[in-house]
């Protein structure tokens, strides 16, 4: 039955039909049962009434007949009208009973029996009346003879009554048998009806289970799975339209939920990435700010160091030179043992400060061919003292002809970061040497390789992840290699990390190869920090001959540092150059206004209303013939104005600290007539 | 050859006619010879006029009609009721038999028209029971009033057949006499079984009461048996008999022993009706005795049933329904015995006439009071 139901029957219709069927069956069964029961009850009642009537009639007839017979016999014994009255009244009553009974619905057998009783009674009455006649006539003997006839009819009447009663008894027995059969049939019918109803109920339950309960269970299960996050939870198609509609709606809802979840996940991922990027950017910005601040601070420190260093270096060299020509061996020995090393150390300090200034210089953001060796050396110089102090070695093996596509400051940051990391790793006790070497890579790439023999990376894969570090919190942020990777990617290169087979770590920076300085690069003015043509330290400068200079050139030295004014004055005077000194811009202007000079050597940053720039501007206005005879000596390379802004060519700028040779070389160049 | 062809044609015509003949209608009859003659003549006349709507009418007669025994009546009724061709039954011969059989017919749904059964109990027999005479409730009064009208009041004796006919009628007669202040000097039953009644003893007892009038509530056959003794014992006795007295015994009274007996007739034998005259003529032609009331009423019973079947069809229930309407919303049927209409109990409105045997075989009857 269940399979016969077509698809998408409505639940309401099926329940209605099923309920109607059961209702009809129940009503039919009830009506049938009631009808059977009533029929049986009526039959029993009818039969019972009939039996009771017949029994009553039979009893009454028998009684009346006996009373009638008794009255007859008594009358014959003693003719008393009272007996005659009783005789006739009883006879009349018996007749009426029988006659009335014959109008009942009787079987032919019963009817015939009653008719027989009636006729026997009538004949008995006739015989009795004849005997009565005789008795009334006083013919007692004759009357008694009539008794025989009366007895005969009485016997016939009694026989008829007995037959009637026997027949009734038989009918009662038959009726009881029929009643039992009916009762069994009724019970059987009831059993059938109940069984049929049970089957109907079972069928309905089956339909409900398969078409209602199971779909609800599927729906509940799918809803629970969906609630637990199972995006694949779906409800199969259902038979009943209501459930199918619910299933379709649920599946559509589940699809929308899945799509919404996927959108949420994607958006969350985007947000997470954006947040990470933002955090990286923020950290990067912080780091940049820190680096920038550090650069500024380094620049300030360098500037402040350059002035005393310039004084120390100048004085040491002067002292060395003076002692080297002393006549006493002891003095020459002092010059060799003390003054020369002093000058050498001062010069090295100057190099370190220069490297710091170069490292701290603000990034230009412009990529270009960068000399790999020089810029690597700048970074290495910054950390060489730390390596030496830690007992570690820093080996540099880079061909000088290699140029790479990079931005100078960022490349130096990259190298310093890697060098720092290697030193930190080796500070754990293992490892002694960091070797930096370069070799051509695949294609147009150059590989700058950092090999150490330290402990290696604990987790190579996480080396470039932000905030990944194995250092103590006070020594590392975990952003160094991340920034390294970022800068290298900006150069179009790659960076990788690995643990070496023999122990230690290797960081490989692959940079695009720039074959050499381009024409544009060559035509660019030399960078201010590019040192002047080297002058050997042990070469004693030649005295200025008159052929190269004016008879006795007059040079104005403007510097707020007395020691530097003194050193420069001493160096120049040893070269037979007349020196005028000024401690600031105002004094210089006054001197220039009053005296003729061939060259102005000025510091850039000076106290007072007129610093180096102001003085240059004043000279451009008031002593324009000296505009090309100005030499700027400064310890603040970052604050150095560009040639475009000031018109001072880079070769007229000398960075502090400087050696005597460098100084004189620039001075001579500036005093050349061509200038 | 031509003769042969003509014979063949005639045979085919006869065959077609036979095939086209409609099935006959059947009425059951349980009547004595006189009643069967009357019914038979009516059927003959109807069929002579084409039957009932083309259906010829025939009678299904069952023996034992004259018996008053209930057993015989019941068996006969069962036979007729079981015959599906029997549309209705005309009978039985006497009240006792009609009353016994009526319960069978009512149980089986068969219309019974009793031509001359007059027992009061027949009014209660059932809705399938009709009769062409009134209840003895009226006849008893009629008889008693006739006696009470005599002056001086006669000493009156009552002899009644102790069955369903005589007993109720006697009760009505005696009750009416007693109401009129006349108590029977002798009142006794008799049995139609010859062995049951010692005639001499009964007559001796009757004579001893010295009655002037004997009200005979019974049939003439028994009276014929006692009449010689009775006449000898009571030569001046006036005998007043109920309607059951009519019957074949009168026809066989060639010695006129019954002359002087007054008995109740259920119809006016002298009423002017050509059909009745035609019936008498037919009887004379046939050499039959003068038709009794039962013969005429049986004739009328056939007419009544024929009209019912003609109007309502052959179904038993339809016939009963139609008969119940006669006298109600349908006009009375004009029978040879006069207008026929039925009361709610199926009884005919009573009409009684008193005829004295011997004064004239067919002298005018006295109309009922």
Image (cartoon, grey):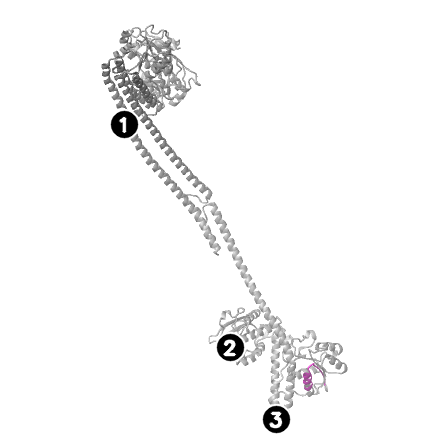
Local crowd size for mark 3, using a 10 Å CA cut-off: few (<14), some (14–19), many (≥20)? few
Local crowd size for mark 2, using a 10 Å CA cut-off: few (<14), some (14–19), many (≥20)? many
Mark closest to the chain's N terminus, 2 or 3: 3
Q: Secondary structure at mark 3?
A: helix
Q: Nearer the viewer, residue A163 or B249?
A: A163
Reply above or below: B4 against A569.
above
Q: Secondary structure at mark 1?
A: helix
> Are the residues at dot 1 and dot 2 in contact (C-beta closer than 8 Å)?
no
Q: Nearer the viewer, residue A437 or B168?
A: B168
Chain of the residue where label 2 is placed in the rendered structure:
A
**CA–CA distance in space, label 3 to label 1:** 181 Å
Query: Which range of residues does the magenta coloring cover?
Result: A553-570
Q: Is residue A560 left or right of residue A166?
A: right
Residue identified by numbered label 3: A330
Q: Is residue B312 left or right of residue A179?
A: right
**CA–CA distance in space, label 1 to label 2:** 136 Å
Residue identified by numbered label 2: A426
Tag of residue A166? 1
Point out the frontmost of discs 1 and 2.
1
In the rendered image, which quarter contains the N terminus of chain A? top left
Reply above or below: A187 against A434.
above
**CA–CA distance in space, label 2 to label 3:** 46 Å
Q: x%, y% of residue B230?
A: 28, 9
Point out the frontmost of discs 3 and 1.
1
Local crowd size for mark 1, using a 10 Å CA cut-off: few (<14), some (14–19), many (≥20)? few
Q: For residue B334: magenta? A: no
Q: x%, y% of residue A515?
A: 57, 74
Instruction: Please identify the residue farthest to the top as the structure is shown.
Output: B359
Residue found at x 43% / y 16%? B331
């Amino acid at each position: 039955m269940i399979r016969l139901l077509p698809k998408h029957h409505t639940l309401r219709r099926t329940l209605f039909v099923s309920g109607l069927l059961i209702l009809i069956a129940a009503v039919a069964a009830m009506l049938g049962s009631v009808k059977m029961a009533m029929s049986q009850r009526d039959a029993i009642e009818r039969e019972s009434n009939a039996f009771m009537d017949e029994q009553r009639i039979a009893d009454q007839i028998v009684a009346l007949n006996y009373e009638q017979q008794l009255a007859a016999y008594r009358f014959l014994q003693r003719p008393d009208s009272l007996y005659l009255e009783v005789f006739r009244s009883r006879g009349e009553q018996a007749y009426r009973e029988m006659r009335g009974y014959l109008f009942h619905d009787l079987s032919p057998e019963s009817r015939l029996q009653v008719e027989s009783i009636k006729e026997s009674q009538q004949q008995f009455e006739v015989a009795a009346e004849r005997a009565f006649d005789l008795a009334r006539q006083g013919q007692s003997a004759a009357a008694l003879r009539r008794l025989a006839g009366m007895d005969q009819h009485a016997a016939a009447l009694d026989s008829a009554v007995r037959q009637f009663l026997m027949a009734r008894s038989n009918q009662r027995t038959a009726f009881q048998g029929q009643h039992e059969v009916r009762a069994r049939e009724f019970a059987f019918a009831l059993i059938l009806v109940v069984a049929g109803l049970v089957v109907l109920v079972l069928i309905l339950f089956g339909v409900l289970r398969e078409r209602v309960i199971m779909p609800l269970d599927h729906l509940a299960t799918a809803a629970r799975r969906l609630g637990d996050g199972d995006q694949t939870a779906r409800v199969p198609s259902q038979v009943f339209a209501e459930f199918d509609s619910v299933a379709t709606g649920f599946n559509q809802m589940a699809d929308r939920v899945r799509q919404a979840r996927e959108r949420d996940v994607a958006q969350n991922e985007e947000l997470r990435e954006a947040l990470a990027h933002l955090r990286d950017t923020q950290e990067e910005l912080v780091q940049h700010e820190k680096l920038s601040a550090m650069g500024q601070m380094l620049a300030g420190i360098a500037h402040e160091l350059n002035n005393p260093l310039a004084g120390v270096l100048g004085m040491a060299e002067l002292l060395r030179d003076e002692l080297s020509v002393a006549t006493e061996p002891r003095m020459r020995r002092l010059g060799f043992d003390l003054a020369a090393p002093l000058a050498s150390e001062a010069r090295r300090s100057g190099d370190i400060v220069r490297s710091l200034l170069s490292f701290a210089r603000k990034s230009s953001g412009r990529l270009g061919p960068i000399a790999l060796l020089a810029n690597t050396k700048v970074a290495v110089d910054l950390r060489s003292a730390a390596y030496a102090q830690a007992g570690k070695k820093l080996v540099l093996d880079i061909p000088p002809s290699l140029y790479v596509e990079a931005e100078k400051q960022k490349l130096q940051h990259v190298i310093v970061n890697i060098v720092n990391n290697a030193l930190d790793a080796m500070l754990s006790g293992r490892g002694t040497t960091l070797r930096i070497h370069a070799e051509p890579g695949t294609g147009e790439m150059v590989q700058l390789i950092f090999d150490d023999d330290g402990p290696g990376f604990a987790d190579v894969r996480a080396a470039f992840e932000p905030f990944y570090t194995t250092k103590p919190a006070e020594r590392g942020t975990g952003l160094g290699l991340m920034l390294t990777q970022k800068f290298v990617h900006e150069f179009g290169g790659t960076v990788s990390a690995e643990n070496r087979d023999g122990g230690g770590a290797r960081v490989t920076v692959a940079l695009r190869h720039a074959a050499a300085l381009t024409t544009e690069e060559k035509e660019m003015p030399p960078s201010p920090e590019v040192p002047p043509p080297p002058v050997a330290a042990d070469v004693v400068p030649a005295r200025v001959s008159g052929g190269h200079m004016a008879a006795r050139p007059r040079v104005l030295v403007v510097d707020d540092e007395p020691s530097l004014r003194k050193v420069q004055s001493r160096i120049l005077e040893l070269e037979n150059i007349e020196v005028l000194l000024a401690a600031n811009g105002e004094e210089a202007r006054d001197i220039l206004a009053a005296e003729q000079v061939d060259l102005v050597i000025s510091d850039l940053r000076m106290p007072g209303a007129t610093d180096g720039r102001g003085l240059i501007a004043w000279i451009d206005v008031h002593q324009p013939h000296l505009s090309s005879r100005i030499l700027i000596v400064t310890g603040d390379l970052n604050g150095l104005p560009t040639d475009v802004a000031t018109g001072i060519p880079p070769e007229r700028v000398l960075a502090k600290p400087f050696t005597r040779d460098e100084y004189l070389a620039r001075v001579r160049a500036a005093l050349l007539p061509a200038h | 050859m031509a003769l042969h062809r003509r014979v063949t044609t005639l045979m085919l015509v006869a065959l077609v006619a036979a095939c086209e003949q409609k099935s006959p209608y059947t009425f059951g009859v349980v009547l004595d010879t006189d009643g069967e003659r009357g019914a038979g003549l009516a059927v003959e006349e109807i069929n002579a006029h084409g039957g009932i709507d083309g259906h010829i009418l025939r009678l299904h007669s069952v023996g034992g009609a004259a018996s008053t025994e209930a057993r015989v009546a019941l068996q006969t009724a069962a036979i007729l009721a079981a015959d599906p061709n029997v549309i209705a039954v005309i009978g039985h011969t006497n009240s006792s038999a009609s009353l016994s059989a009526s319960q069978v017919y009512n149980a089986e749904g068969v219309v019974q028209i009793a031509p001359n059964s007059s027992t009061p109990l027949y009014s209660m027999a059932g809705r399938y029971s009709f009769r062409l005479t009134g209840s003895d409730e009226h006849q008893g009064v009629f008889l008693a009033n006739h006696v009470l009208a005599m002056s001086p009041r006669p000493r009156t004796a009552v002899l009644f057949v102790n069955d369903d006919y005589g007993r109720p009628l006697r009760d009505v007669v005696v009750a009416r006499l007693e109401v009129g202040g006349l108590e029977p000097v002798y009142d006794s039953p008799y049995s139609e079984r010859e062995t049951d009644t010692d005639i001499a003893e009964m007559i001796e007892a009757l004579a001893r009461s010295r009655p002037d009038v004997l009200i005979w509530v019974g049939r003439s056959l028994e009276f014929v048996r006692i009449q010689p003794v009775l006449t000898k014992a009571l030569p001046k006795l006036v005998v007043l008999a109920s309607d059951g007295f009519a019957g074949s015994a009168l026809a066989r009274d060639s010695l006129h022993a019954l002359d002087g007996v007054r008995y109740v007739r259920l119809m006016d034998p002298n009423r002017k009706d050509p059909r009745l005259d035609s019936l008498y003529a037919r009887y004379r032609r046939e050499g039959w005795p003068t038709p009794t009331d039962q013969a005429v009423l049986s004739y009328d019973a056939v007419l009544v049933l024929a009209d019912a079947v003609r109007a309502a069809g052959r179904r038993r229930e339809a016939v009963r329904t139609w008969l119940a309407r006669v006298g109600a919303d349908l006009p009375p049927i004009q029978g040879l015995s006069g207008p026929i209409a039925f009361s709610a109990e199926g009884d005919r409105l009573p009409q009684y006439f008193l005829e004295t045997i011997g004064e004239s075989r067919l002298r005018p009857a006295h109309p009922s009071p």
